[in-house]
Image (cartoon, rainbow, N blue to C red):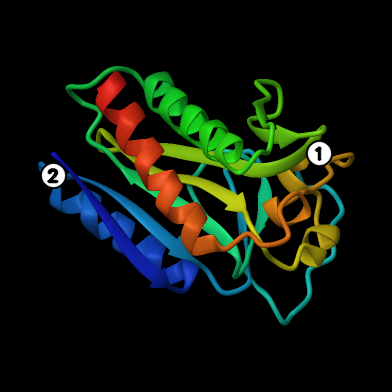
Amino acid sequence: MIIFKDLGTKEWKYTFFLMNKFIKKKKKINEIWFVEHPPVFTVGKNFFKKKYYITKKINIYYTNRGGGITYHGLGQQLVYFLINLKKRKKIFILLRIITNSIIKTLKYFKIRGYYNKQKPGIYVNKKKICSIGLNIKNGYSMHGFSLNVDMDLFPFNLIVPCNNEHEKISQMKFFNKKILIKNVKKILKTNIKFFYKKFF
């Protein structure tokens, strides 16, 4: 069984606490969380200590997900997958669900996206529009993806996103001026349900 939860806007640090609390209880029900975070930088396990400029106005946290440093802010849709993988197929199946759901959602809004295996994420015209970062703990998946919908992209200029100095960042707003995050959330949920049922 799977439950979708809309957490609204929550601080990243508190959401991370909730994820760890959920996994510690080892619930039998799988959950997928939709959330937006106020401005924050998060650093993954594969972070390379390259030069970056962090403003004191934005907090920075180290976490256990894969990938390097990235930025989260309002207008970016984050989706976290708390899935018991002990009796399920391998993590690449979950990754397939995630990538297919994002690409199909972009297509709905007439945006052509594709998955880049060398630089895990979804791209449009060679620019990253969605970052993906997962972790497995106690047999559960943690974290998920962040899709740029309609946000302030400037803080990405202060870091080396995902350890790639040449990384360029995009968002759905550039391709659809009238895009609303509530509409994106609705389509994402429909597509995730479809692919989850198909593969799991």
Residue pointed to by mark 1 = 164
From this viewpoint, which residue is outermost toward the bottom? 57
Picture coordinates of residue 148, whole percent (x, y): 64, 54
Looking at the image, residue 145 lies above or below residue 125 = below
Q: Check disc 2 and give the amino acid type.
A: Ile
Q: Residues within 10 Å of mark 1 (few under 14, many from 20)?
A: some
Toward the left, the furthest residue is 28
Screen quadrant of the N terminus: top left
Task: Judge by depth and name the residue closer to the eye, 175 or 41.
Answer: 175
Q: Position of residue 48 (x, y in %)?
A: 74, 42
**Residue under the image location 67 percent in, 62 percent down:** 178
* In-image side of 198 versus 127 (left or right): left
Report the disc number at residue 29.
Answer: 2
Secondary structure of the residue carrying tag 2 is: loop
Badge 1 marks a residue whose secondary structure is loop
Left or right, 56 with reference to 140: right
Badge number at residue 40: none
- Is residue 136 visible in the rendered structure shown here? no
